Amino acid sequence: MKDGKLGFGIIGCGVIAPTHRKAIEACAEAEVVAVCDIDEEKGKAFAEESGGAQFYRDYAEILAADDVDVACICTPSGLHADCVIAAAKAGKHAFCEKPLDIDRGRMTAMIAACREAGVKLGCVFQSRTSPDMIKARKTIMAGELGPMVLGDALLKNYRSQAYYNSAGWRGTWALDGGGALMNQGVHGIDLLLWLMNDDVESVFARCDHLVRDIEVEDTCVAALKFKGGAFGTIIGTTSCNPGEARRCELHGKHGTICVNGTKLSRWAVTSEDDGRATEVEPPEEIDGSGGTVGDNKAVTAEGHVFLIDDMVKAIKEDRDPYIIGESARKAVDLILAIYESSRTGQDVPVTSS
Ligand SMILES: NC(=O)c1ccc[n+]([C@@H]2O[C@H](COP(=O)([O-])OP(=O)(O)OC[C@H]3O[C@@H](n4cnc5c(N)ncnc54)[C@H](O)[C@@H]3O)[C@@H](O)[C@H]2O)c1
């Protein structure tokens, strides 16, 4: 830490790295001091654009640097745990991109490594930072919708074959860990679980690659049974052309909340036990099918700004970050159960081990 500013090192200088840099630059108590990539040309160019930050080729080296307090993990998903564990062992805090990792054992190990080393592990799921989503979660947590009946996520994205061909790790089991769900759908699946304020007990699913030439799924349908008794569905794809805004539809005995993109498109409740729900507020403007629905480079920085600012405060106040590893792993645990169900044709319980 220099002049009250935490030094950030960004590991992985690809598509999402500039969003991390933008968020760090927006925080008065943080600065980018170093960057790292195995691709030297790309990493050096990114270092240059980051105000002449120090470039490292090896993540062990950036993690050994005295001026790095926090490591942003922006590497392919299957490398997240390795980087976070190395950061914890070096005594650095970690701010990790979604998905937390793609393997249950590795997620357990990375969470434990940070807890044991006494460093913070902050996780990225920027959808949880939208004021509308926070309002929806509070309403459901307060029981205003009554006992929950259904929680559905419609995650109809578009990614071209050129997208999958743009980096060797995309669409592979080893490093992407899955496709339409593990990479793109994981945002909406995390949001569904967080809004429902419930975990899924078991799942029955079908997944396949229907259009793209990739190892992993480009399309999936899953039927969920929540621990609290509700049912739910997930429809996830990267092969809807041109893609639809994300929808989450949450229905309780006494009302409904629907999310379209990052906005609430429906919020209706009743206070009568057997009454019909009416609108609480007229729906706000719906944000259409923009954002990352059809383009992986279209991530806006607001969510990362919120999360980096919170990460800095969590370190300074010695408290947990807004999204902790134990919470971020839930979407991945569910996706892994979905994949297993599709492989075996069985109803599969969702577990973290
Ligand atoms: N929050 C979001 O909305 C969002 C959006 C895009 C990507 N992501 C996540 O960010 C991560 C990166 O995705 P991306 O699209 O930026 O990928 P990318 O392929 O564009 O960038 C990854 C970078 O990591 C580098 N790299 C690979 N192995 C490395 C290593 N051992 N050490 C250092 N650098 C290494 C690669 O050379 C590449 O430059 C993924 O986990 C992805 O899921 C999140």
Image (cartoon, helix red, strand yellow):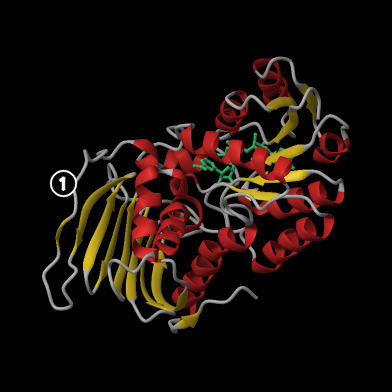
Q: Identify the residue at horizontal 42%, vertical 77% (top origin).
A: 203
Above or below 124: residue 58: above
Q: Identify the residue at horizontal 14%, vertical 78% (top origin).
A: 274
Label 1 sits on residue:
282
79 lies left or right of 224? right
Q: Secondary structure at mark 1?
A: loop
The N terminus: image quadrant = top right
How many residues crowd around disc 1 within 10 Å: few (fewer than 14), some, or many (20 or more)? few
Q: Amino acid at mark 1?
A: Pro
Q: Nearer the viewer, residue 260 or 277?
A: 277
Q: Nearer the viewer, residue 293 or 4?
A: 4
Q: Nearer the viewer, residue 328 or 342?
A: 328
Q: Position of residue 232 (x, y in %)?
A: 33, 72
Q: Quadrant of ligand 1?
A: top right
Q: Position of residue 2 (x, y in %)?
A: 81, 25
Quarter of the image where one finds residue 220: bottom left
